[in-house]
Image (cartoon, helix red, strand yellow):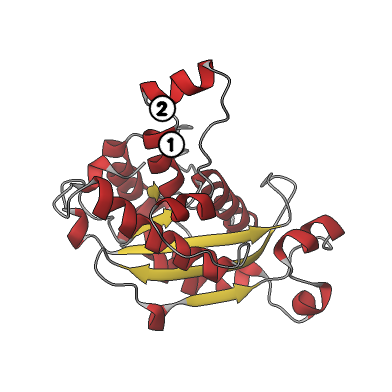
Amino acid sequence: MTLIRPRRKITQADWALYMQKRAPLAQDPAIRRFFETPPPSLDMPIAEVPMVALDMETTGLDERRHAIVSIGLVPFTLGRIKLAERRYWVVKPPRPLNEASITFHHITHSEIANAPDLDAIIDPLLEALAGRIVVVHFRHIERPFLDAAIKSRRGEGVMFPMIDTMSLEARLHRQKLWARFRRWLGRPPVSIRLDASRRRYGLPSYQGHHALIDAMATAELLQAQIATHYEPSTPLRALWT
């Protein structure tokens, strides 16, 4: 079977076509259903876009050597965070936890002892993501880790468009002329980490490195970013990547 392999960067216009072409090629039923559900239109106002905030805790930063240990997701819209539909899973990584990762995400050996393998949650996870725009804070974790983890278990990966709240903060605080001038003066860059970004909008600090809490924090951050810098009528194309 020949799969369409995405380029390192898929343009906005390519995402819908990529997912449309992947659907009939998918051998796994859950993956096929995921790709058969089209993402929202690029022209849809952000106020109408169904979204889901996604966060993962992993044993490291390299999807080739490290693994997912927990996943949290919270469906939401610009006007409402749907906590009743939240999902949280702890999963058993294929390799033992190391002490450094335990210190970081606080998930212990005893918590994963009876946890399922990620394969057991792929179907409900993809169902929760299908047809929604996934929102994360730093897309270079969730997208490659999930793609690699599903590929290792089902033989085919899953890629999809995202809104990255960290990238939106970078546009404002790292890429403008004033930010470059600050760097030229030798001043440290403005932090665009999740908690620091939230504080700029007057949002409260939450316990970090818990997948469900960070997912909810990311949903709240996007709502605040749009309320401050955009309009409810802003088209999705201005935000996703």
Choose between 69 and 206: the one closer to the eye. 206
Vertical placement of residue 46 versus 4, above or below: below
Pointer 2 local density, CA inside 10 Å: few below 14, some 14–19, many at least 20: few
Position in image of residue 55 (x %, y %) = 53, 61
Q: Looking at the rendered structure, which numbered label has been put on residue 114? A: none
Choose between 9 and 24: the one closer to the eye. 9
Pointer 1 local density, CA inside 10 Å: few below 14, some 14–19, many at least 20: some
- Mark 1 and mark 2 residues within 8 Å of each other at the beta carbon: yes
Residue drawn at x 52%, y 21% as measured from the top left? 183
Position in image of residue 236 (x %, y %) = 23, 48
Can see residue 29? no
Residue drawn at x 36%, y 54% as measured from the top left? 24
Choose between 1 and 34: the one closer to the eye. 34
Choose between 193 and 93: the one closer to the eye. 193
Left or right: 135 in relation to 140: left
Left or right: 18 in relation to 184: left
Residue drawn at x 47%, y 38% as measured from the top left? 5
Measure how far apart labels 1 and 2 are at the Cα level: 6 Å
Left or right: 127 in relation to 120: left
Which residue was labeled with disc 1? 170
Quadrant including the C terminus: top left
Q: Secondary structure at mark 2?
A: loop
The amino acid marked with disc number 1 is Ala
Vertical placement of residue 215 versus 185, above or below: below
Which residue was labeled with disc 2? 175
Can see residue 138? yes
Question: Which image quarter: residue 153?
Answer: bottom right
Residue drawn at x 56%, y 47% as measured from the top left? 144
The amino acid marked with disc number 2 is Gln
